[in-house]
Amino acid sequence: MSCIYGLGSPAEYAKIRIQLKKDASFPRQKLLRRLAELQYSRNDVDFHRGTFRVKGEMVDIYPADALDKYVHLGFNGDVIETIEERTILTGETTIGLTNIDIYPATHYVAPAERFTESLDMIEKDLSIKVNEFTKAGKLLEAQRLKERTNFDLEMMRTVGYCNGIENYSRYFDGRKLGEPPYTLLDYLPKDALVFIDESHMTIPQITGMLAGDRSRKQTLIDFGFRLPAAFDNRPLSFDEFNKKVNRLVYFSATPGDYEKKVSEQIVEQLIRPTGLLDPTIEIKPTKHQVDDLVHQVRERTKKKQRVLITTLTKRMSEDLADYLTDEGIKVHYLHSEIDTMERLEILRSLRLGDVDALVGINLLREGLDLPEVSLVAILDADKEGFLRGETALIQTMGRAARHADGHVIMYADVLTNSMKRAISETNRRRQIQEDYNRAHKIKPKTIIKAISESKT
């Protein structure tokens, strides 16, 4: 979602870059001043992105956009004698360069003349807002805003930067009140092709981002924590996003109504190279669902296969995980509070067989790609709502589509409309896949995927 948030003007960003050429005159002291102006800091000990170091006639720069390489400059007087790209770990030269551009360490850097003008505008708006607070009898808010903004102004005048400088981005970009911010999309070519993955989730997020951001900023502005210009440090609205993107491709196994409506062409990618089919689906009553689930997990475990189990509440997931553990089943509870590294280790344990089953509330959101999983069990499938809607059910059932024996059990006493549509769509896809496999004599094969090394 970061592509719809402000980054600063691409024109200004390119304008103030440092252009270095081999054998060209560029006094070393001038270079160091220019680097400081672009928000690079000198650090001869802890060399990291956005810093530079100096040793005699040599200057090393770690560009803000670099990963594991830095730029080494060798001077002979005021002339740049060598420009080399070197690796951070060993310092070995990977390539000799004839020229290179060094871009600012932050996107909120403006030319000197614009910078001074921007600070004057901030002071003017500060005076207006402080007077408004004072006339309204909000003396605390007036004092708070005055102190915070003056501190930011002092920092910007002294070091050219302050924490939260993005809240003043409208001034530095030269934008008018209410104009959309510059974003990553402005850095792309006009004919760029943009792909939106999982569009059924992404489109609603883009639609709702602006309202959520404005609600938070309104509180900060009302209580004197920020100037009203903070409103313009915002994500794009959905209409603004569409105006900046000329060519779009939506990707989703469950596209929403919007994508279907605006798409000029819809292409279904149902056939898999391995011949795998969408899973078979079975509906069972909720009575004794836990006992039946224990039996199903044990049957899959005998075949060295794994199971995913989804519940509706956190408490039920915890209780079920405890019960399955008491029954001698190796199980783990997967939830949103688990950090990324631990989550990777849990998924790795499942694939290795150290865990037989995962229990969770909304496993479909985890982006799970586990070839060893042959069974997905959906408890209380008839409790229609967000987690048991058509889209959620199809996404959840798709977790079993990586295995040749993929199967889904829905525990439900009522066949809801969402269940009907999800089952119908899955069966339609499976029929197309079966017909193709039959016509081309393809036998479904489970995906073979390497298990990554432990990160701990």
Image (cartoon, rainbow, N blue to C red):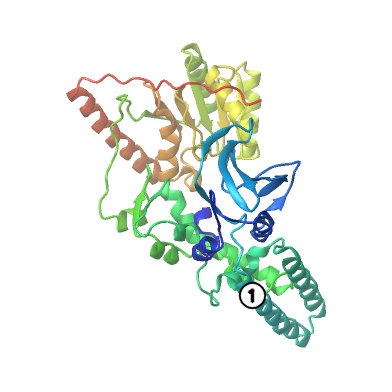
Q: Residue at x 32, y 40 (%)?
A: 425
Asked whether, in this view, residue 430 is left or right of residue 151, the answer is left
Q: Quadrant of residue 401?
A: top left
Q: Secondary structure at mark 1?
A: helix
- Given residues 374 and 281, the one toward you in this image is 374
Q: Is residue 15 above or below residue 398?
A: below
Q: Residue at x 63, y 33 (%)?
A: 91
Q: Quadrant of residue 113?
A: bottom right
- Given residues 372 and 86, the one toward you in this image is 86
Residue 323 place in picture, x, y as percent? 64, 24
Residue 225 place in picture, x, y as percent? 73, 69
Q: Is residue 80 above or below residue 359?
A: below
Asked whether, in this view, residue 228 is left or right of residue 43, the answer is left
**Amino acid type at image mark 1:** Ser
Q: Name the image quarter holding the C terminus.
A: top right
- Given residues 252 and 388, the one toward you in this image is 252
Q: Is residue 265 above or below residue 143?
A: above
The residue identified by callout 1 is 118
Residue 115 seen anywhere in this rendered image of the structure: yes
Q: Of all residues shown, which one is farthest toward the bottom?
A: 135
Q: Residue at x 56, y 48 (%)?
A: 65
